[in-house]
Image (spheres, helix red, strand yellow):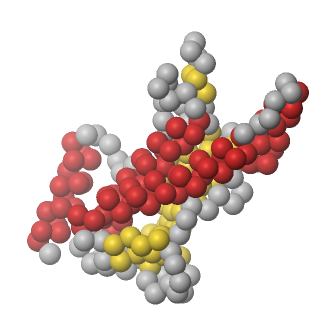
Amino acid sequence: MAKRSVWVLTILMGLWLMGCAPRWTVITQASPNPFIGKKEFVVMPIDYTGLKIGEKSEEEYLEGKEAKADAKGKDSNTRSNLDGDKAEMSTFFLEKLKSGTEDSGIKMNAAAGEITTYVIKPHIGSMEPGFYAFVAARPSRTVMRLKIEDKDGKLLDEIEIVSSSAATMTSPAAGNRYRSDSKVIGDIAADYINSRVLAE
């Protein structure tokens, strides 16, 4: 218990010394904290239902890209590329969530079969790809709502995490920035889980 207190205090002191608040926004949080001392969670794949890319729906965005390619007499790979980006974002998110909590003795298992423990449900509803054009650039922006539910589907915690990745000569493609965002979000989500499990 004392070791846990020191660990949480160290995190909070580090944030205070850096002059920054936690990198997540709490939407709702169960009280009393049901996660203290819990060591196993199930993680669902990232849900992209209702995804907006920039100001457009996912389908509007893809149709626009396909129309531009068609007007130039070219095939568009945007749809398949985006599908690949989303699948890898889910993979990278889970990897970071696992690695960021393992030192705390917490197991993060990909969802499979019957749910018998707490469930982490990540949802990305907004992705801004940004762009890189040598003389001008705009970073990506990815927004995740992360819910934690009990095995019966009751919502306990919900937070929002936002990440931006710079568009540079070494990351000119939107997919690179999306992957970078998913890793940052995974790290932040791990910090949040640690703060709840190791709290007093």
Q: Is residue 107 above or below residue 134?
A: below
Q: Residue at x 21, y 42 (%)?
A: 17
Residue 165 higher or lower than 168, as above or below: below
Q: Is residue 68 visible?
A: no
Residue positioned 53% across, 52% down in the render: 88
Answer whether residue 63 is visible to the viewer in this image: yes
Does 14 sit left or right of 84 as displayed?
left
Q: Position of residue 1 (x, y in %)?
A: 14, 75
At 42% from the left and 47% from the top, the residue drawn is 184
Furthest-top residue in this view: 135
Quarter of the image that includes the C terminus: bottom left
Above-or-below relation of 188 to 65: below
Q: Is residue 101 left or right of residue 112?
A: left
Give the mark count: 0
Image location (x, y in percent) of residue 193: 36, 65
Q: Position of residue 182 (x, y in %)?
A: 48, 49
Q: Is residue 187 left or right of residue 151?
A: left
From the viewer's side, name the closer residue of 184 and 17: 184
* Residue 132, placed above or below residue 43: above
At horizontal 62% and vertical 39% (from top left) the residue drawn is 128
| Left or right: 2, with 91 as reference point | left
Task: Report x, y in % for residue 56.
Answer: 76, 43
